[in-house]
Amino acid sequence: MQGYLPIIILILLLIASSIRIVQEYERGVIFRLGRCVGARGPGIIFLIPGIERMQKVDLRVVTMDVPSQEVITRDNVTVKVNAVVYFRVVNPVDSVIKVYDFVKATSQLAQTTLRSVLGQSELDELLSQRDSINQRLQHIIDEGTEPWGIKVSNVEVKDVELPPNMQRAMAAQAEAERERRAKLIHAEGEFQASQTLAKAADVISMNPATIQLRYLQTLREIAVNQSSTVIFPLPIDLIKPFLKMATMQPESKEE
Protein backbone atom coordinates (compact mmCIF):
# COMPACT_ATOMS: atom_id res chain seq x y z
CA MET A 1 0.00 0.00 0.00
CA GLN A 2 2.82 2.33 0.84
CA GLY A 3 4.27 1.70 -2.61
CA TYR A 4 1.15 3.13 -4.23
CA LEU A 5 1.09 6.23 -2.03
CA PRO A 6 3.34 8.36 -4.30
CA ILE A 7 1.22 7.38 -7.28
CA ILE A 8 -1.98 8.35 -5.49
CA ILE A 9 -0.45 11.67 -4.46
CA LEU A 10 0.65 12.31 -8.04
CA ILE A 11 -2.82 11.54 -9.35
CA LEU A 12 -4.38 13.90 -6.78
CA LEU A 13 -1.96 16.64 -7.76
CA LEU A 14 -2.78 16.14 -11.45
CA ILE A 15 -6.51 16.33 -10.69
CA ALA A 16 -6.04 19.45 -8.57
CA SER A 17 -3.97 21.11 -11.28
CA SER A 18 -6.60 20.31 -13.89
CA ILE A 19 -9.44 22.01 -12.01
CA ARG A 20 -10.24 25.66 -12.76
CA ILE A 21 -13.05 27.79 -11.37
CA VAL A 22 -14.55 30.47 -13.62
CA GLN A 23 -16.71 33.20 -12.08
CA GLU A 24 -20.16 34.15 -13.35
CA TYR A 25 -18.81 37.31 -15.01
CA GLU A 26 -15.91 35.46 -16.68
CA ARG A 27 -15.33 33.01 -19.50
CA GLY A 28 -12.40 30.71 -20.03
CA VAL A 29 -10.91 30.44 -23.53
CA ILE A 30 -9.43 26.93 -23.87
CA PHE A 31 -6.34 26.14 -25.95
CA ARG A 32 -5.51 22.48 -26.65
CA LEU A 33 -1.96 22.03 -27.91
CA GLY A 34 -2.04 25.65 -29.12
CA ARG A 35 -5.37 25.32 -30.90
CA CYS A 36 -8.39 27.27 -29.63
CA VAL A 37 -11.29 24.92 -28.89
CA GLY A 38 -13.79 27.50 -27.61
CA ALA A 39 -14.88 29.19 -24.42
CA ARG A 40 -16.19 27.54 -21.28
CA GLY A 41 -17.78 28.62 -18.04
CA PRO A 42 -18.94 29.73 -15.64
CA GLY A 43 -18.34 27.10 -12.97
CA ILE A 44 -15.79 24.29 -12.61
CA ILE A 45 -13.68 23.46 -15.65
CA PHE A 46 -11.43 20.41 -16.00
CA LEU A 47 -8.31 20.76 -18.12
CA ILE A 48 -6.03 18.05 -19.42
CA PRO A 49 -2.72 18.73 -17.66
CA GLY A 50 0.09 19.56 -20.05
CA ILE A 51 -2.26 19.56 -23.06
CA GLU A 52 -4.86 22.25 -22.36
CA ARG A 53 -4.50 25.71 -20.95
CA MET A 54 -7.08 28.40 -20.21
CA GLN A 55 -7.14 32.18 -20.46
CA LYS A 56 -9.84 34.02 -18.53
CA VAL A 57 -11.74 36.93 -20.05
CA ASP A 58 -13.82 39.41 -18.00
CA LEU A 59 -17.25 40.11 -19.50
CA ARG A 60 -18.12 43.11 -17.33
CA VAL A 61 -18.40 46.63 -18.70
CA VAL A 62 -15.05 48.43 -18.74
CA THR A 63 -14.95 52.18 -18.09
CA MET A 64 -11.92 53.60 -19.86
CA ASP A 65 -10.73 57.21 -19.72
CA VAL A 66 -9.40 58.56 -22.99
CA PRO A 67 -6.37 60.79 -22.26
CA SER A 68 -6.65 64.48 -23.06
CA GLN A 69 -6.15 65.11 -26.76
CA GLU A 70 -5.15 68.38 -28.41
CA VAL A 71 -7.43 68.89 -31.38
CA ILE A 72 -7.62 71.57 -34.07
CA THR A 73 -11.25 72.09 -35.07
CA ARG A 74 -12.43 72.78 -38.59
CA ASP A 75 -12.50 76.54 -37.88
CA ASN A 76 -8.83 76.41 -36.73
CA VAL A 77 -9.37 76.59 -32.95
CA THR A 78 -7.03 74.52 -30.77
CA VAL A 79 -8.82 72.78 -27.89
CA LYS A 80 -8.01 70.01 -25.44
CA VAL A 81 -10.64 67.29 -25.15
CA ASN A 82 -10.93 64.16 -23.04
CA ALA A 83 -13.59 61.48 -23.10
CA VAL A 84 -14.73 58.22 -21.50
CA VAL A 85 -15.56 54.98 -23.32
CA TYR A 86 -17.82 52.19 -22.02
CA PHE A 87 -17.31 48.78 -23.62
CA ARG A 88 -17.49 45.06 -22.84
CA VAL A 89 -16.45 41.74 -24.34
CA VAL A 90 -19.24 39.94 -26.22
CA ASN A 91 -17.05 37.29 -27.91
CA PRO A 92 -14.33 36.00 -25.58
CA VAL A 93 -12.65 33.92 -28.30
CA ASP A 94 -12.21 36.85 -30.70
CA SER A 95 -10.98 39.13 -27.91
CA VAL A 96 -8.14 36.66 -27.23
CA ILE A 97 -7.09 35.36 -30.63
CA LYS A 98 -7.74 38.41 -32.84
CA VAL A 99 -6.08 41.17 -30.80
CA TYR A 100 -3.10 41.14 -28.48
CA ASP A 101 -4.50 43.48 -25.77
CA PHE A 102 -8.07 44.53 -26.45
CA VAL A 103 -8.10 47.20 -23.71
CA LYS A 104 -5.01 48.96 -25.07
CA ALA A 105 -6.19 48.55 -28.65
CA THR A 106 -9.58 50.06 -27.82
CA SER A 107 -7.87 52.96 -26.05
CA GLN A 108 -5.64 53.75 -29.03
CA LEU A 109 -8.58 53.51 -31.43
CA ALA A 110 -10.64 55.84 -29.23
CA GLN A 111 -7.84 58.45 -29.17
CA THR A 112 -7.37 58.51 -32.93
CA THR A 113 -11.12 58.55 -33.56
CA LEU A 114 -11.57 61.42 -31.09
CA ARG A 115 -9.00 63.55 -32.90
CA SER A 116 -10.42 62.68 -36.31
CA VAL A 117 -14.09 63.35 -35.54
CA LEU A 118 -13.51 66.56 -33.57
CA GLY A 119 -11.12 67.81 -36.26
CA GLN A 120 -14.03 67.68 -38.70
CA SER A 121 -16.33 69.69 -36.41
CA GLU A 122 -16.48 73.40 -35.70
CA LEU A 123 -16.14 74.83 -32.20
CA ASP A 124 -19.81 75.85 -31.95
CA GLU A 125 -20.86 72.35 -32.99
CA LEU A 126 -18.53 70.84 -30.40
CA LEU A 127 -20.03 72.98 -27.63
CA SER A 128 -23.71 72.86 -28.59
CA GLN A 129 -24.17 69.48 -30.33
CA ARG A 130 -22.38 67.21 -27.89
CA ASP A 131 -24.93 64.38 -28.19
CA SER A 132 -24.54 64.00 -31.96
CA ILE A 133 -20.74 63.99 -31.64
CA ASN A 134 -20.94 61.31 -28.94
CA GLN A 135 -23.10 59.14 -31.20
CA ARG A 136 -20.65 59.52 -34.09
CA LEU A 137 -17.74 58.56 -31.87
CA GLN A 138 -19.60 55.53 -30.50
CA HIS A 139 -20.56 54.33 -33.99
CA ILE A 140 -17.05 54.64 -35.43
CA ILE A 141 -15.26 53.06 -32.45
CA ASP A 142 -17.81 50.24 -32.28
CA GLU A 143 -17.25 49.42 -35.95
CA GLY A 144 -13.49 49.28 -35.35
CA THR A 145 -13.72 46.99 -32.30
CA GLU A 146 -16.42 44.65 -33.63
CA PRO A 147 -13.90 42.21 -35.21
CA TRP A 148 -12.22 41.91 -31.81
CA GLY A 149 -15.42 40.78 -30.10
CA ILE A 150 -15.80 44.15 -28.32
CA LYS A 151 -19.08 46.07 -28.05
CA VAL A 152 -18.78 49.82 -27.39
CA SER A 153 -22.01 50.84 -25.69
CA ASN A 154 -21.36 54.54 -25.07
CA VAL A 155 -18.83 57.33 -25.60
CA GLU A 156 -19.02 60.64 -23.73
CA VAL A 157 -16.92 63.75 -24.28
CA LYS A 158 -16.25 64.89 -20.72
CA ASP A 159 -14.46 68.21 -20.95
CA VAL A 160 -13.50 70.76 -23.60
CA GLU A 161 -10.69 73.09 -22.56
CA LEU A 162 -10.55 76.33 -24.55
CA PRO A 163 -7.53 78.66 -24.81
CA PRO A 164 -7.75 81.81 -22.62
CA ASN A 165 -8.08 84.23 -25.55
CA MET A 166 -11.00 82.22 -26.92
CA GLN A 167 -12.68 82.22 -23.51
CA ARG A 168 -12.42 86.02 -23.35
CA ALA A 169 -13.79 86.35 -26.87
CA MET A 170 -16.74 84.09 -26.09
CA ALA A 171 -17.43 85.99 -22.86
CA ALA A 172 -17.47 89.29 -24.78
CA GLN A 173 -19.76 87.77 -27.39
CA ALA A 174 -22.15 86.50 -24.71
CA GLU A 175 -22.19 89.91 -23.00
CA ALA A 176 -22.93 91.66 -26.30
CA GLU A 177 -25.75 89.21 -26.98
CA ARG A 178 -27.29 89.91 -23.55
CA GLU A 179 -27.07 93.66 -24.16
CA ARG A 180 -28.74 93.24 -27.54
CA ARG A 181 -31.59 91.28 -25.99
CA ALA A 182 -31.97 93.86 -23.22
CA LYS A 183 -32.21 96.68 -25.75
CA LEU A 184 -34.77 94.77 -27.80
CA ILE A 185 -36.88 94.11 -24.72
CA HIS A 186 -36.64 97.77 -23.67
CA ALA A 187 -37.61 98.96 -27.15
CA GLU A 188 -40.54 96.53 -27.22
CA GLY A 189 -41.72 97.86 -23.85
CA GLU A 190 -41.46 101.46 -25.07
CA PHE A 191 -43.43 100.59 -28.18
CA GLN A 192 -46.21 98.93 -26.20
CA ALA A 193 -46.30 101.85 -23.73
CA SER A 194 -46.59 104.36 -26.58
CA GLN A 195 -49.51 102.43 -28.05
CA THR A 196 -51.28 102.43 -24.69
CA LEU A 197 -50.65 106.17 -24.20
CA ALA A 198 -52.00 106.89 -27.67
CA LYS A 199 -55.21 105.01 -26.83
CA ALA A 200 -55.47 106.86 -23.50
CA ALA A 201 -55.04 110.21 -25.30
CA ASP A 202 -57.85 109.32 -27.66
CA VAL A 203 -60.14 108.57 -24.72
CA ILE A 204 -59.18 111.79 -22.90
CA SER A 205 -59.69 113.93 -26.01
CA MET A 206 -63.33 112.82 -26.17
CA ASN A 207 -64.04 114.54 -22.79
CA PRO A 208 -61.99 117.69 -21.98
CA ALA A 209 -62.92 117.51 -18.30
CA THR A 210 -60.79 114.42 -17.90
CA ILE A 211 -57.73 116.53 -18.65
CA GLN A 212 -58.38 118.62 -15.54
CA LEU A 213 -58.92 115.47 -13.48
CA ARG A 214 -55.67 113.97 -14.71
CA TYR A 215 -53.96 117.27 -13.95
CA LEU A 216 -55.21 117.24 -10.38
CA GLN A 217 -54.24 113.61 -9.94
CA THR A 218 -50.71 114.36 -11.07
CA LEU A 219 -50.49 117.21 -8.54
CA ARG A 220 -51.64 114.84 -5.81
CA GLU A 221 -48.94 112.35 -6.71
CA ILE A 222 -46.28 115.07 -6.63
CA ALA A 223 -47.51 116.41 -3.27
CA VAL A 224 -46.78 113.08 -1.56
CA ASN A 225 -43.13 114.12 -1.26
CA GLN A 226 -43.13 116.88 1.40
CA SER A 227 -39.77 118.23 0.30
CA SER A 228 -41.25 119.33 -3.03
CA THR A 229 -42.85 122.73 -3.64
CA VAL A 230 -45.85 122.66 -5.92
CA ILE A 231 -46.89 125.82 -7.78
CA PHE A 232 -50.54 125.45 -8.70
CA PRO A 233 -51.72 127.82 -11.46
CA LEU A 234 -55.40 128.71 -11.24
CA PRO A 235 -57.44 128.53 -14.42
CA ILE A 236 -58.64 131.90 -15.76
CA ASP A 237 -62.22 130.64 -15.80
CA LEU A 238 -62.18 130.39 -12.01
CA ILE A 239 -60.80 133.90 -11.54
CA LYS A 240 -63.07 135.75 -13.99
CA PRO A 241 -66.18 135.89 -11.69
CA PHE A 242 -64.13 137.43 -8.90
CA LEU A 243 -62.63 140.02 -11.28
CA LYS A 244 -66.09 141.03 -12.46
CA MET A 245 -67.29 141.46 -8.88
CA ALA A 246 -64.28 143.60 -8.07
CA THR A 247 -64.85 145.94 -11.01
CA MET A 248 -68.58 146.28 -10.35
CA GLN A 249 -68.28 147.36 -6.67
CA PRO A 250 -66.43 150.73 -7.29
CA GLU A 251 -68.95 151.75 -9.99
CA SER A 252 -71.89 151.23 -7.61
CA LYS A 253 -70.23 153.39 -4.90
CA GLU A 254 -69.76 156.32 -7.30
CA GLU A 255 -73.40 156.29 -8.17
Image (cartoon, rainbow, N blue to C red):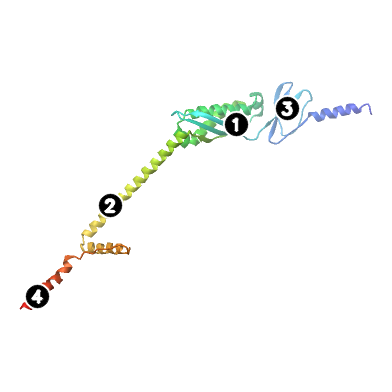
In this rendering, the label closer to the viewer, 2 or 3: 2
Q: In whole angstroms, how far apart are the C-alphas of marks 1 and 4?
A: 117 Å
Asked if residue 213 lies left or right of residue 87, the reply is left
In this rendering, the label closer to the viewer, 1 or 4: 4
Which residue position holds label 3?
Answer: 54
Residue 52: x %, y % from top left? 75, 24
Along the line of sight, the residue nearer the viewer: 74 or 96:
74
Q: In whole angstroms, how far apart are the C-alphas of marks 1 and 3?
A: 23 Å
Which residue position holds label 1?
Answer: 151
The vertical placement of 243 against 106, above or below, is: below
Residue 220: x %, y % from top left? 29, 64
Q: In whole angstroms, how far apart are the C-alphas of marks 2 and 3?
A: 86 Å
Q: In whole angstroms, how far apart are the C-alphas of marks 4 and 3?
A: 137 Å
Q: Tell me the quarter of the picture where residue 33 sits.
A: top right
Residue drawn at the location 44% of the way across and 37% of the way down: 168
Q: Residues within 10 Å of mark 4 (few under 14, many from 20)?
A: few
Asked if residue 71 lies left or right of residue 60, the reply is left
